[in-house]
């Protein structure tokens, strides 16, 4: 570990943890949305999702404010910016997925899409559990290995979803709508993997 003689603002770690908690909240709301076909319930859940997205925007803005006003940062400024942006992207993708469910007036969703959202929940919890360990740069390898494994699982579910949507049994317009939703769920899974990859890069640089 490199020797540091200058005090650093450690509040960045609190913001990373807050963003990860927002990701968990968003994933759990999305999981509820895909398991119900009630329009009223989905409307309430979608509002919760928007509130989470707005709260996470505030976290992102706070990190950027601190980044612009802090002379010595915990680690490389570009890595802080990248990690913050990637955490924010994950919430955005989940919010977009929730919005599509309402806008497209979707009914029951494919089992594979619902399973993929459960994968998001698992990866989100793994991310939230790892963020507090970022400050010490310890015991993080299991985290990025697990999230990469979960992303591979999400990839397989995405391919199965698309294959079934375009096998001729689903109305063409509905197939397009459901694929749009699957694309957003897959983007969120990819985003969680991006976060894990960035954490790995940071940990290797700081070791």
Image: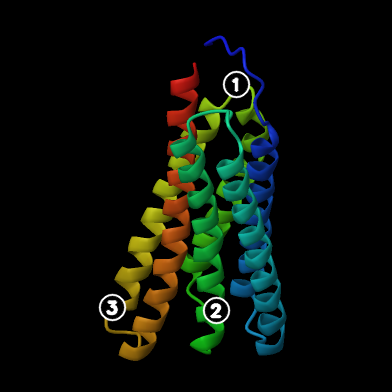
C-beta proximity under 8 Å, tags 1 and 2? no
Q: Residue at x 67, y 42 (%)?
A: 17
Q: Residue at x 50, y 80 (%)?
A: 100
Q: Nearer the viewer, residue 109 or 195?
A: 195
Is 38 above or below relative to 83?
below
State the residue position of label 1.
138
Q: Secondary structure at mark 1?
A: loop
How far across and down, in percent of the image, does residue 186 sit? 42, 60
Marks 2/3: CA distance?
Answer: 23 Å
Marks 3/1: CA distance?
Answer: 45 Å
Q: Residues within 10 Å of mark 3 (few under 14, many from 20)?
A: some
Is 179 above or below relative to 102?
above
Judge depth for marks 2 and 3 and give the one in front: 2
Q: Secondary structure at mark 3?
A: loop
How far across and down, in percent of the image, does residue 119 sit? 53, 53
Q: Secondary structure at mark 2?
A: helix
User: Any mark on residue 99, and which?
Assistant: 2
Q: Residue at x 34, y 77 (%)?
A: 165
Marks 1/2: CA distance?
Answer: 37 Å
Along the polypeptide, which appears first: circle 1 or circle 2?
2
User: Any mark on residue 166, and which?
Assistant: 3
Along the polypeptide, which appears first: circle 3 or circle 1?
1
Along the polypeptide, which appears first: circle 2 or circle 3?
2
């Amino acid at each position: 570990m490199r020797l540091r003689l200058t005090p650093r603002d450690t509040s960045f770690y609190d913001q990373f943890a807050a963003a990860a908690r927002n990701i968990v909240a968003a994933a759990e709301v999305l999981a509820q949305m895909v398991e119900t076909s009630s329009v009223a319930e989905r409307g309430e859940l979608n509002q919760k999702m928007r509130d989470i997205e707005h709260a996470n925007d505030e976290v992102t803005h706070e990190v950027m404010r601190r980044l612009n006003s802090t002379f010595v940062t915990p680690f490389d400024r570009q890595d802080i910016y990248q990690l913050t942006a990637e955490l924010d992207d994950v919430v955005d993708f989940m919010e977009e997925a929730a919005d599509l469910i309402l806008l497209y007036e979707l009914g029951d969703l494919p089992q594979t899409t619902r399973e993929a959202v459960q994968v998001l929940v698992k990866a989100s919890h793994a991310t939230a559990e790892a963020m507090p360990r970022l400050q010490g740069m310890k015991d993080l390898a299991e985290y990025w290995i697990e999230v990469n494994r979960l992303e591979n699982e999400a990839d397989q579910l995405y391919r199965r979803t698309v294959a079934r949507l375009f096998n001729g049994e689903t109305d063409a317009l509905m197939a397009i709508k459901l694929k749009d939703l699957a694309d957003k769920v897959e983007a969120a899974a990819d985003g969680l993997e991006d976060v894990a990859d960035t954490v790995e890069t940071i940990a290797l640089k700081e070791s």
